[in-house]
Image (cartoon, rainbow, N blue to C red):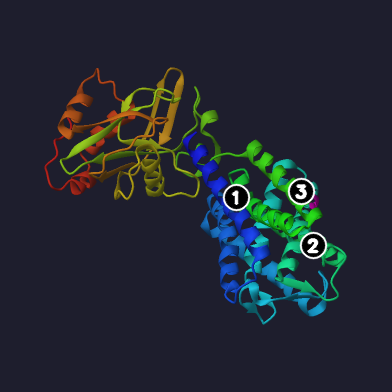
Amino acid sequence: MLKTSRISIFTAIVLVLLASGAVFMTRVEMPRWANVLSSINVLLFAVPSFWALKLWLGWRDAAKLVAILGIYAVAAEILAVYTGFPYGHIGYSGNLGYKLFGVVPWTIAFAWTPLMLCSYTAARDLFVSRRRRILFSTFLLLAFDLVLDPGAVTLGFWSYTGGGVYYGVPALNFLGWVVVGMVGSLITEFTISHFRPMLPPPVQIGSSAFFIIFFWTALAAVAGLGIPAAIGGGCAIAMYLWYRRSYYAFDEMVVLVDEENNPLATARKSETHNADTKLHRAFSVFLFNSKGELLLQRRAFGKLTWPGVWSNSCCGHTMLNERTEQAAARRLGYELGLRNVELHIALPHFRYRAEKDGVVENEICPVLVGVTDQEPSINPHEVAEVEWIAWDDFLDSIADSSCELSPWAVEEGFLLAKSPVLRKVLGFKELKAAA
């Protein structure tokens, strides 16, 4: 809930800025340094889509896909400039940045690719049939161009020899978008099939396209381009409804693994934890202050597993394509407001299984340790309260058979008491051995 409200506020701010930018660009003559500003804007537009792609596929495969689609987009534009196929004879001004081979701005690779990724993702969400996905993706790309091309011509980003009937854009351009879009859809389909992602395509990949279309829709409305404004408004509303319908948070998807910790699949956390929870990836964090005291947290009473139970400093699940240290740092910030804590893996192979109230935890759960003197700022949706406790007192409490701490915190505590990593991290004092 807290994350969702922050995202909504951020999105509203971005939309206001985009609308303001659209008004400014239609009423003010482009300055000489417009090419620099336009290049930066193109890259900023692409960031949300590329970031989501990285979380979905991992850095390596995401970079491969972006490179393939970017090269393809630039190649298609170069072909059009020299031959008139497939878009018609098009010429670019210098307002979109440095022109490769003196004809096509390098930013085209980052302007077209987010639109292609959005079209593919929407098609994957709506259709099982690959043929239907390719047709829908092609159609959606065409709809996008009906919005942005007239605006780009109005601003002088590019122009067509002889103009055209659709706000200065020739019909041949749209036929070209059908051809390029269909080939791009085929490339995207088969490339991603080769990667075999374990997560469903996230709607967040469409975020860049949503912002792009919103901007060009606002610009069309201000510039008096009625048809592009109407098409863009319809696209933006449809994309918003799609986002609401299909959104999932990456950190809500747990990674199911085999006994050797090899990933097998992903599943929603809410659907995974039950009486027959499958083995999955997780982590635990034990934080100490400079006095050697351990931070304990009481889990929020609304949590599915072990609600209201006292436990170690922080726990969570590792996302796909995420290192354990990254996951722990992310969760410390979300649950406790603690950032920039240096963490060390003390128990890399810890695994446990526990059950309470018919719900099972079954995890490969590396344990990390760290030191901080920051005071926690708790997220009430995750943490009810926190307390610093002397390490010796903690060990005494888990040695008591009536201890009511979480079972994983108890097991981890016994093992950490013998850990050379913890002794090194807390080298300023001798640690009490486990009872």
Left/right placement of residue 278 relative to residue 341 reads: right
The residue lying at 65 percent from left, 50 percent from top is: 210
Mark 3, Cα crowd under 10 Å, few <14 / some 14-19 / many 20+, is: many
Q: Residue furthest bottom?
A: 102
The residue lying at 82 percent from left, 67 percent from top is: 168
Residue that mark 1 sits on: 15
Q: Amino acid at mark 2?
A: Trp
**Mark 3: secondary structure:** helix
Residue that mark 3 sits on: 133
Span colored in magenta: 135-139
Which of the two labelled residues, at mark 2 and mark 1, occupies the earlier sequence position? Answer: 1
Residue that mark 2 sits on: 177
Along the viewing direction, whichever of 251 and 33 lies nearer the viewer: 33
**Mark 1: secondary structure:** helix
Along the viewing direction, whichever of 7 and 132 lies nearer the viewer: 7
Question: Which image quadrant is residue 141 in?
Answer: bottom right
x%, y% of residue 364? Answer: 41, 38
x%, y% of residue 321? Answer: 49, 50
Q: Is residue 264 visible?
A: no
The residue lying at 57 percent from left, 45 percent from top is: 12
Along the viewing direction, whichever of 203 and 428 lies nearer the viewer: 203
Along the viewing direction, whichever of 422 and 383 lies nearer the viewer: 383
Mark 2, Cα crowd under 10 Å, few <14 / some 14-19 / many 20+, is: many
Residues at discs 2 and 1 in contact (Cβ within 8 Å): no
Question: Which image quadrant is residue 244 in?
Answer: top right
Which of the two labelled residues, at mark 2 and mark 3, occupies the earlier sequence position? Answer: 3
Left/right placement of residue 45 relative to residue 418 reads: right
The vertical placement of 109 against 426, above or below, is below
Q: CA distance from mark 1 to mark 3?
A: 29 Å
Left/right placement of residue 231 relative to residue 204 reads: right
Q: Is residue 271 visible?
A: yes
Where the C terminus falls, by quadrant? top left
